[in-house]
Amino acid sequence: MSENLTLVQAVRDGLRDEMAEDDDVLVMGEDVGKNGGVFRATEGLYDEFGGERVIDTPLAESGIIGTAIGMAAYGLKPVPEIQFSGFMYPGFDQIVSHMARLRTRSRGRYTCPMVLRAPMGGGIRAPEHHSESKEAFYVHEAGLKVAMPSTPHDAKGMLISAIRSPDPVIFLEPKKIYRAFREEVPDDTYEVPLGEAAVRREGTDVSVFTWGAMTRPTIEAAKNLDGEIDVEVVDLRTLSPLDIDTVVESFKKTGRAAIVHEAPQTAGVGAEVTATIQEEALLYQEAPVERITGFDVPFPLAALEDYYLPEPERIESGIRDAFDF
Amino acid sequence: MVRVIDENGEVVDDAEVPDLTDDELVEMYRNMKLARRFDERAVSLQRQGRIGTYPPLSGQEGAQIGSAMALAEDDWTVPSYREHGAGLVRGLPLKQTLLFWMGHEAGNRIPEDANIFTVAVPIASQIPHATGLAWASKLRDEQDKAFLCYFGDGATSEGDFHEGLNFAGVFDTPNVFFCNNNQWAISVPRERQTASKTLAQKAQAYGFEGVQVDGMDPLAVYKVTKAAVEKAKDPEEGDLRPTLIEAVQYRFGAHTTADDPSVYRDEEEVEKWLAKDPLPRMEKFLKRTDRLTDEDVEQIEADIEDDVADAIAAAEETPRPDPVEMFQNVYAEMPKRLEQQLEWFQSIRDEHGDDALLED
């Protein structure tokens, strides 16, 4: 059996199923309880599981993340929500100094099996600090896994994998596509493994690597180029650890690549993908790797965000550049 | 401020000596002596270049040993980085403390049967962990464990102090927040951390009890910690479980071996606090009450000299760790990229030999 769900409903479905399956799983954060989360990602969970497993916390991100680390070290599997990824920074010290390092520091005596969820990215006309894409911060930190689903089916399956992961996971949910479309999502629990990219569209001319909310405009651009350029679209899904094999396999086929992400260009995850291609498949390379990304500017307020975010036209131009070189 | 014995080891007016056996009282003294001797040797080892930067604890033995001995085996301690004395009471061998400050990760591998959390270097960052550990215990309906978190006076200025204590109050977690107020955060005095009259009074804002205790009086520290632990496990109706204990004390030495305290504090001040030294104080108390003789002291001193020497020998005999360990325990399973880096690194070792890769 399956249901036609939006991405945010699929997140909720994944949380619900895993909480039903494993008593150690709990949800905590600001407004996640009675209110069901500001995006409704935890809707109904409070009624089903009660206030000890769906916990409204004080408004304090470092406190939320820091106490979750303690809970995880004690054997629970907390899934804290930070209301917007732009508010993770008060807890950044806890993330990089402890969540990422507890296993290393204690030589495996203590581990931190928690999932830190946060809505991320632009495209919903939000106020300042509500639109950033800072996945590269977390990819840079050894000890963390970083995942970003682009479909409802993946959102549920990847979230379940993240909760079951023995490692801490930063789970970034692109809010632009929280309700943008629906997809059949199985009722049962299932895993979409972390660390595996998905080829969304096969092609032979140019490989385009993307993730999160940029996956849809990238597929649209690929379709627009149909007949002109045969574009392969690879959704990386997990940014740490990167699925090197899928990236390299696709690139060896096409010899040309473009990367699409909404984060600023400099030191973005696109740079890591580019370096991987250089290291692993230089002799297959026919053209410079194109990066179609946000600009190296603070994310603009809503009136200009359409100019900031890559959209199909910009992506098409970038793909053409990779193809025509 | 709670006190049990004064600077001459005499029981202060109306104070009740905690209910400890003679052996336990002597054990408390012995642990403090051991911590002091360890500390002296560790500072000296650092001066000789045999260990790295080291944070001394001399002056703080009363607070560390008194509090750690008030805990049951199932209770937990969540340290910062100066609690070597508390660590030894709780089951962390001195050898491991030395290894950690010699730069061996293995020093932080807490023995399986010891309920001690890892060292936390970023100030106050361990406080939310202590709250989370206690909260998890409560959510699992355990009624029999308390979680004691150590931090210093400087930590009370950090956001994580506030957030950790605030969560503890809101969720009524079985915590004891133990502030080692040693008057100095490196070079910044206690008065620069807060305009609050005491640090203990900050508990009031979180809705639970704050207690100020003479941190150089191990019996007073034991007493207030014991009471806080009992309340954490089984509070009276209307009481919240957490307690903030401010143990007023002084570090006789530097913040770490990397600073020189004569730059920022007066010798007169140090002298004033040296008069409160917990060791002679406890010794006088024990002798005055016929629990300890000069011969006992000699025997204890000889024994601890051996204990410390053995720990140093064992630590120094420990070979440099295998560099492969650096790649392990980052994730449950090594990711491919890391495997590649390890493989490359091993090829470099094979090619050049370890001697060429090491600076000394």
Image (cartoon, coloured by chain):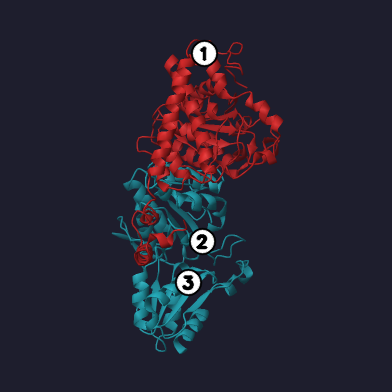
Chain colours: A cyan, B red
Mark 2 → mark 1, Cα distance in angstroms: 60 Å
Of residues B87 and A90, the one nearer the viewer is B87
Mark 1 Cα shell of 10 Å, populated few (<14), some (14-19), many (≥20): some
Amino acid found under the numbered disc labelled 3: Gly
Residue B134 drawn at (x, y percent): 45, 35
Residue B9's place in the image compared with B213, above or below, is above
Q: Is residue B320 above or below residue A180?
A: above
- Quarter of the image holding residue A188? bottom left
Residue at the spot of label 2:
A137
Which mark is first along the chain, 3 or 2?
A: 2
**Which residue is tagged 1?**
B287
Q: Tell me if I can see residue A79 in this picture.
A: yes
Give left or right: position of A92 versus A52.
right
Q: Find residue B178 and report its horizontal and vertical position in percent.
A: 54, 32
Query: Relative to A59, is B119 on the left or the right?
Result: left
Vertical comparison of A240 with B236: above or below: below
For label 2, the crowd category at 10 Å Cα-Cα, with few meaning under 14, some 14 to 19 and many 20 or more, is: some
The answer to whether marks 2 and 3 mark residues whose Cβ atoms lie closer than 8 Å is: no
Image position of A67 with respect to B57: above or below:
below
Chain letter, disc 2 residue: A
